[in-house]
Image (cartoon, coloured by chain):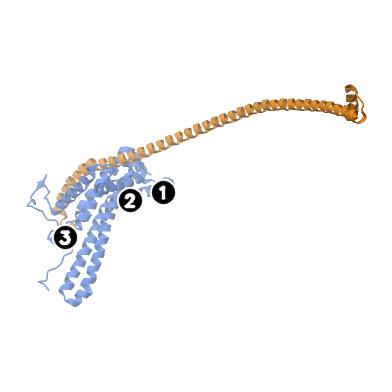
Chain colours: A orange, B blue
Amino acid sequence: MPQISQLAATYSSQIFWMLVIFGAVFFLVGRGMAPKVLETMEGRDQKIAADLAAAEAARHEAQAQDDAWKAAAAKQRGEAQALIAAAKAEAAKAAEVRLAAAGADADAKVTAAEARIAAAREGALAEIETVAADAAAEIAARVAGLTVAADAARAAVKDVLHG
Amino acid sequence: MATEAKVDPMHQFTIEPLFGTDHWALGGFNIAFTNSALWMLISAVVLYAFMLGGMKRELVPGRWQMMVESMTGFIENMLSANVGKEGRKYLPYVFSLFMFILFANLLGLLPLGLVGLHPFTFTSHFTATGVLAILSFSIVLVVGFTKHGLHFFSLFVPHGTPLPMIPLIFVIELVSFLVRPFSLGLRLFVAMMAGHVLLEVLSSFVIGGANAGAFFMGLVSIPSFILMVAICALEILVAGIQAYVFALLTSLYINDAEHLH
């Protein structure tokens, strides 16, 4: 077993070179390179975390803007509906006024027309009386040879006509 | 029989000085640049090259950067799970430890013998794993005593121990604490050595069976070869698991030193 049989001859060389070479590895690789590798990894992790945080913040911002936009839209819709309602009410009122005016006008016209009709009927009745009185006087003159005064004839006709 | 080449499954662990450096010495101690040192250097260089791919530092990582980052993140997770937020400052050490052992184990498994090179798994030597284990143990001691002072000894007396039991428990806990560097170093060394010996023994069966004729080839060589393929896959798993266990136990021990109980 060379590990033991060569021990006396080689131990110093083994220990010396192990210390020299492992020392070099420790200072060059362990202290020089490994911390830098770790630093790179940490930098990357931080960058990823920062990017994620930025994305999260942007999402929140977008959400807030969306909410604000929705609120503004709801407000404007409310305003528009109020305007429509007001306009509707106004239009209804105006229509009512005009309807009332037109109704009054029509009523007046109907009243006037009724008055005219009454007058015409009155006139017509008077005319009929006159004609009937004339006709009665004529008939009396022709049939009985009586001369009836116009007033008497009219009174007689009036009696007959009005009971 | 005597002339037949003998397959020595332990020969692969032999340390040989390379490039005529066997006379190099420092303060009277031999520091020859051996094949073991060469493979330590190769592991370190390959690890450095691997890590270079993770240094592009792009926001959207490519495959290579992703690999480096998942390795680093793996150790970082392990430390934060076992030690907590204080674990961060041990990342350079535990990461170096894990990756160095992992690369050493995996490179030692490369089938470079096919092209005439011989990979050497220095983690199969307790002189190498022991250095790492003692380093981990020293860190635990240094951190424990600087952070908690003599209060660190309360680590050996779990909460709620009945008073008469304290001396006994203290000794037991102290022994289990002092055994840690040995168990840490030996576990890795034994696991790596056992796997390599097993592969070598099986490959000697394959060769020996094939040399003994068609009958033995069918009886011994082919089943051994199939087993070798399966054990190679197992060894790749073991290479990762042992590196992970070493780093995990180190981080658990560091947790003890940071937080006592």
Q: Residues within 10 Å of mark 2 (few under 14, many from 20)?
A: few
Q: Which mark, by number, is residue B124? A: none
Q: Position of residue B18 (x, y in %)?
A: 9, 53
- Name the element at disc 3: helix
Q: Nearer the viewer, mark 3 or mark 1?
A: 3
Of residues A90 and A4, the one nearer the viewer is: A90
Q: Indicate left or right for A65 with B131 as reference.
A: right
Q: Amino acid at mark 3?
A: Gln
- Does residue A14 appear anywhere in the picture? no
Q: Residue at 93%, 29% (x, y): give it.
A: A144
Residue corresponding to mark 1: B165
Tell me which corner region of the image, top left, top right, bottom left or bottom right, holds residue A153: top right
Res B259 visible: yes
| Residue type beneath disc 2 | Ser
Question: Which residue sits at x=52%, y=31%?
Answer: A75
How far across and how far down the image is residue B28, in percent? 11, 46
Marker count (numbered): 3
- Asked if B183 appears above or below B83 in the picture, the reply is below
Whole-number angstrom distance, CA of label 3 to CA of label 1: 49 Å
Chain ID at mark 1: B
Horizontal side of A117 relative to A144 (left or right) equals left
* In the rendered image, residues at marks 3 and 1 fall on the same chain: yes
| Mark-to-mark CA distance, 3 and 2 | 33 Å
Disc number lying in front (1 or 2): 2
Chain letter for mark 2, please: B
Element at label 1:
helix
Residue identified by numbered label 2: B176
Q: Secondary structure at mark 2?
A: helix
Front position among marks 3 and 2: 3
Q: Position of residue B29 (x, y in %)?
A: 12, 48
| Residue type marked 1 | Met
